[in-house]
Amino acid sequence: MKDRDEPISLTDYDQQWARLFSEEKEILSRALGPWLIGPIEHFGSTAVPGLLAKPVIDIMAPVESLEESQDAIGAVQSLGC
């Protein structure tokens, strides 16, 4: 995690971001399958081709509720995330 006082850097769009998201999506889909209620999505500035962005790939994994998906936290932590 970045230090709150560390400046945010922006960079030109990188075509590798879509591939990196796809790879993470596959890993997360296997780990989070029992809790997912929809597709894992790539959102934020790195998801928009051509957009200047902070080089952080934002990923959203939809679940029914935080309460019902508590065990999903451990599943992701076991991946080293």
Image: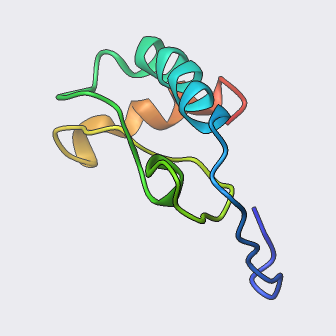
Q: Is residue 1 above or below residue 39?
A: below
Image location of residue 28, percent across then percent down: 49, 23
Q: Is residue 36 above or below residue 14?
A: above
Q: Residue drawn 61% across and 38% down? A: 17
Q: Spot the residue most to the top.
A: 30
Q: Please name whichever residue, 59 or 46, is drawn nearer the observer in this view of the structure.
A: 46
Image location of residue 51, percent across then percent down: 52, 61
Q: Spot the residue most to the front.
A: 50
Relative side of 58 to 20, left or right: left
Q: Please name whichever residue, 29 or 71, is drawn nearer the observer in this view of the structure.
A: 29
Q: Residue drawn 49% across and 60% down? A: 45
Q: Is residue 10 above or below residue 46?
A: below
| Picture quadrant where residue 74 is located | top right
| Picture quadrant where residue 68 is located | top left
Relative side of 67 to 2, left or right: left
- Quadrant (top left, top right, bottom left, bottom right) of the N terminus: bottom right
Relative side of 74 to 11, left or right: left
Q: Please name whichever residue, 24 or 30, is drawn nearer the observer in this view of the structure.
A: 24
Relative side of 66 to 54, left or right: left
Image location of residue 43, percent across then percent down: 40, 50
Q: Residue drawn 78% across and 68% down? A: 2
